Image (cartoon, grey):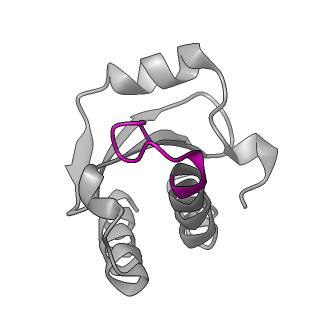
Amino acid sequence: MLPAKNRLRKRRDFERVFNSKSAFSGRFFRLIYISNNLSFSRLGVVVSSKVSKRAVVRNKIRRRVYSFTKPYIKIINPTLDMAVIISKTAVEADIKEFKDDLTRVLEKVI
């Protein structure tokens, strides 16, 4: 899990990121980012109930994204707010495929 200071939490922060035009897409998600005025990067994960009706599944996906991005959060441009929007295909994804896809997109942001 990412430290609390590195997670997007407030609705207005998410809305600011969603209004950004800068984005990359993977097979299982879309990563949107915008610069912030802080000395560290922040990441938020959005897993809609359309992805899965079960909260257990949605939380599992969210935890995976946070754990896969933890090594990258310090080397990413230190002034970014990012939001990862998960797609329906992520539920059936193999862990390795999902991690590789996320790593590939995060390396574009670096």
From the viewer's side, name the closer residue of 88 and 28.
88
Q: Is residue 55 magenta?
A: yes
The percent position of residue 3, horizontal first and vertical second, equals 79, 53
Quadrant housing the C terminus? bottom left
Residue appearing at x 42%, y 27% in the figure: 17
From the viewer's side, name the closer residue of 48 and 14.
48
Q: Would residue 17 be found to the left or right of residue 43 on screen?
A: left
Q: Which residue is the extreme one toward the top?
A: 12
Total marks placed: 0
From the viewer's side, name the closer residue of 47 and 84.
47
Query: Which residues lie in the magenta part?
Result: 47-57
Is 74 drawn above or below residue 97 in the view shown?
A: above
Q: Would residue 26 be found to the left or right of residue 10 on screen?
A: left
Q: Which residue is the extreme one toward the front?
A: 54
The percent position of residue 58, horizontal first and vertical second, equals 51, 50
Residue appearing at x 36%, y 74% in the figure: 98
Is 100 drawn above or below residue 25 in the view shown?
A: below
Residue appearing at x 42%, y 80% in the figure: 95
From the viewer's side, name the closer residue of 17 and 86.
86
Q: Is residue 62 magenta?
A: no
Q: Which residue is the extreme one toward the right?
A: 4
The percent position of residue 1, horizontal first and vertical second, equals 73, 61
Residue appearing at x 31%, y 25% in the figure: 20
The percent position of residue 7, horizontal first and vertical second, equals 67, 42
Residue 75: quadrant of the picture: bottom right
Instruction: Name the chief secondary structure element in magenta.
Output: loop
Q: Would residue 66 be found to the left or right of residue 17 on screen?
A: right
